[in-house]
């Protein structure tokens, strides 16, 4: 199968486009299908070509090409573009941006685009939702309705000194990844990612129907799983870590050091502005 992922001219570098293509392939194919990714700049705009095998390498199942998967791919691509603060195309039949907002985005002066960028950058450097609010306020934003609960308002709002009115953190205003629920979820998901990739996600499921009933495949899967666990353990030893308790202590120390650096960065950004 062959996918093409195109970006607006002048909006993304070759390197970032290639990275987004890799993220799309990894999220879509989940490590099951072999693929080749190339990034081209020969058409006046950067675009990716993703070619992947029709059968997966685990269960040998055939990839199901249908409308549902088409929209899954499109939504994945749009989500990645939003995470990288890039524009997306509105589906036909749905209300798009107003012309003046489109023009502002095109000239890179849209305040909403800057807000999305600040939100994305802040999510990358914080560990909790409360830290996110503190860092956004340090960037100069006035934030209201950030709390959760029965008596709380539905939408969080952001307002920078150069905004004439607050901007809602709603799917309609900023995008589905910028509601307060989604912001909190993105931070919590980021926290759950360890320094090393999860071993569990890499292991082959020996209880899968096509493996459980085949002694040869079971032996192969057990051998591959042993290799995976051994490789992850060697990674821990490389970092002088001998158990998961030491790993958690190291992560906590790194988070504390990162917070100190991030606080300095936010302070400098505020001075520059």
Image (spheres, rainbow, N blue to C red):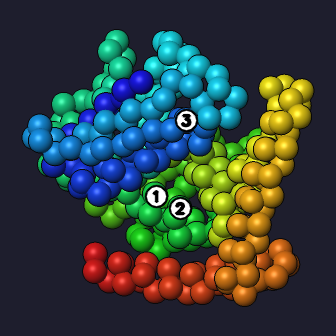
Question: In the displayed structure, does residue 192 sit left or right of residue 121?
Answer: right
Disc 2 to disc 1, how far (Cα)?
6 Å
Residue at image location 43% in from the left, 47% down from the top: 22
Q: Where in the figure is residue 169, as x and y percent of width and height? A: 49, 45
How packed is label 2: few (under 14 Cα within 10 Å), some, or many (20 or more)?
many
Disc 3 to disc 1, how far (Cα)?
33 Å
How packed is label 1: few (under 14 Cα within 10 Å), some, or many (20 or more)?
many
Element type at marker 1?
helix
How packed is label 3: few (under 14 Cα within 10 Å), some, or many (20 or more)?
many
Pointer 1 residue: 119
Disc 3 to disc 2, how far (Cα)?
30 Å
Residue at image location 51% in from the left, 38% down from the top: 34
In front of the other: 187 or 165: 187
Pointer 2 residue: 123
* The label number, if any, that marks residue 33 in the structure image: 3
Point out the frontmost of discs 3 and 1: 3
Element type at marker 3?
loop
In front of the other: 270 or 52: 52
**In which quadrant is the C terminus drawn?**
bottom left
Residue at image location 46% in from the left, 20% down from the top: 70
């Amino acid at each position: 199968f062959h996918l093409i992922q195109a970006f607006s001219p002048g909006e993304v570098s070759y390197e970032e486009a290639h990275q987004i293509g890799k993220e799309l392939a990894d999220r879509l194919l989940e490590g099951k299908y072999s693929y080749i990714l190339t990034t081209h700049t020969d058409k006046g705009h950067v675009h990716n070509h993703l070619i992947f095998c029709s059968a997966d390498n685990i269960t040998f199942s055939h990839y199901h090409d249908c409308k549902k998967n088409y929209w899954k791919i499109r939504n994945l691509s749009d989500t990645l573009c939003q995470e990288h603060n890039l524009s997306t195309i509105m589906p036909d039949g749905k209300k798009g941006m107003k012309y003046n907002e489109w023009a502002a985005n095109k000239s890179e002066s849209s305040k909403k685009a800057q807000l999305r960028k600040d939100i994305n950058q802040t999510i990358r450097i914080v560990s909790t939702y409360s830290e996110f609010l503190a860092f956004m306020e340090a960037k100069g934003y006035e934030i209201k309705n950030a709390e959760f609960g029965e008596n709380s308002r539905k939408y969080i709002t952001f307002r920078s000194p150069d905004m004439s009115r607050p901007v809602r953190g709603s799917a309609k205003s900023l995008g589905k990844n910028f509601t307060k629920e989604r912001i909190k979820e993105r931070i919590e998901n980021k926290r759950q990612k360890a320094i090393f990739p999860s071993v569990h996600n890499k292991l082959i499921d020996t209880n899968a129907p096509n493996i459980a009933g085949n002694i040869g495949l079971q032996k192969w899967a057990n051998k591959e799983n042993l290799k995976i666990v051994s490789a992850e353990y060697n990674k821990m030893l490389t970092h002088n870590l001998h158990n998961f308790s030491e790993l958690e202590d190291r992560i906590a120390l790194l988070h504390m050091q990162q917070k100190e650096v991030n606080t300095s960065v936010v302070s400098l950004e505020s001075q520059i502005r």
